Image: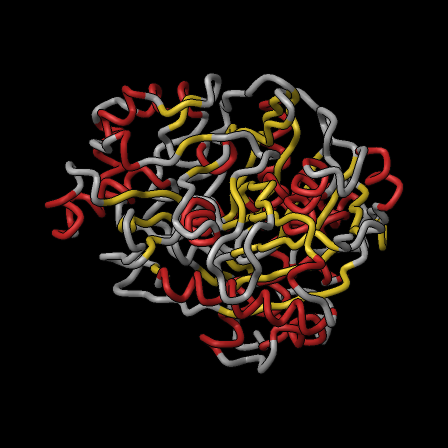
Amino acid sequence: MSKYVLAIDQGTTGTTVLLLAKDLRVVGRGYTEIRQIYPQPGWVEHTPAGIWGSVGVAVKKAFASAHAKGKDVAAIGVTNQRETCLFWDRKDGHTAHNAIVWQCRRTADRCERLKVLGKEPLIQQRTGLVVDPYFSATKLQWLIENVKAIRNRIAEGHWIAGTVDSYLLWKLTGGKVHATDPTNASRTSLMNLRTLRWEPELLGLFNIPSHVLPEIKSNSEVFGVTKGLSFLPDGIPIAGIAGDQQAALFGQLCINQGDAKCTYGTGAFLLINTGDQPVISRQRLLSSVAWQREGDIRYALEGSIFISGAAVQWLRDGLGIIKKSDEVTELALSVKDSGGVVFIPAFVGLGAPYWKSHARGMLLGLTRGTTRGHIARAVLEAMAFQVWDIMRATEEDSGIRVTSLKVDGGAARNDFLMQFQSDLLELEVIRPRIIDTTALGVALMAGLNTNFWRTMGAVRDAWKEERRFRPKMKADERLAHIQRWKEAIARV
């Protein structure tokens, strides 16, 4: 009898694989970093071989840590960095160009032209998205127009394209299945948010042939089975796929309207469950599919922050003021406050609710008395300030008052940051026992679909919180922090 569900979480900076037992214990874990490629300022790429190779290595590490084997796996779930996309050969899987990462800004001018042509209202109404280089459509269009090997043979069906989930599914099934799910498809600017189908008018607008795109299936069904892999046996069902942030929403059990979560990873992503109807934002937030299961469709309103935990990596790798990322808290707590320093982490532009593609990062309020501690504290505070911006906009758009916020991702382990976030939002912040809720969410989708978990009730009983942060900052102090942030962000 199979003992575990295997979750593959292919993220921006690396791939995590978890083996989960029925009581939601993580019995095995593997992680492998992937190389970041910056061909020129504002451009970000990954090698497809690096993405795929990291999956195999992380799976082997997870098995080794659990002393488990492939025969112990009941089902596989796949979650991924969403808007990152690529083309590959439908016959042998070779690629003609690197994957273009969601952070990449190479299509900023193309997006500005679409706005000037008045196309943004059409795109927002059909897809729930704003016009921005963040999303996949202009990336795919750029690849078609600029990569000769793709451009010359795309008409004959030589190439297929997709987001990372589609690529991994194709590889896992030995090239048998080219499919995606509504959560990833809803981040391309090509899917109609209400029909959950590729939108012909938008395919024409971006000059993307429909035959290169994957079939859109629900989030929780058997997409295919493993075949021809060196690290997994044949025949394991891939039974759940979801984009990383929607997977985290499900993994946090935010299944009711008004439930909200924020994932603090490379970027930060706040999502609120808006029920069975999409909310088209007036605050330039994003409306996406939360999930489609058993015919039931749920939507989410999302604010996307491009740089969150990546700012701590910058302190480590760029400035060299810390040697390891987990040193940032001690450094931040070495001072009583940020000394008036405010950090704007617009390394690759600003996301919601500003959407300024050409904005760049700033450190404001520096004096001769500024220390490494002040800068570290300002970096952590900036993560919370950006979430505060989005929470206010989300509540205005949806008319829903959020009563608590569930948190996950690597930076959610930071107690200082979580307390500061609770203080700014004046909300309880709930951190779960399993912080890898992105992987947990897609594991639950796969496991529920294959009866590894028979009911949501059984999942709720097993889900546990680890800590609850409650607001304790005085009102005048909180308002002073917020005013300082508002003044700084207005200068971008």
Q: Which of 218/424 is in front?
A: 218
**Is residue 472 visible to us here?**
no
Residue at horizontal 52%, vertical 66%? 56
Q: Position of residue 67 (x, y in %)?
A: 73, 72
Residue at horizontal 45%, vertical 25%? 128
Q: Which of 361/159 is in front?
A: 159
Query: Would you place residue 364 above or below residue 334 in this image?
Result: above
Q: Which of 295/376 is in front?
A: 295
Left or right? Give the position of 376 relative to 213: right
Q: Position of residue 441 (x, y in %)?
A: 67, 44
Query: Would you place residue 475 above or below residue 379 in this image?
Result: above
When asked about the image quadrant of residue 26, the answer is bottom right
Query: Would you place residue 329 above or below residue 263 in this image?
Result: below
Q: Position of residue 455 (x, y in %)?
A: 81, 33
Residue at horizontal 48%, vertical 17%? 194
Q: Position of residue 217 (x, y in %)?
A: 50, 30
**Is residue 283 visible to us here?**
yes
Residue at horizontal 48%, vertical 63%? 363
Query: Would you place residue 400 above or below residue 272 in this image?
Result: above
Coloration mode: secondary structure
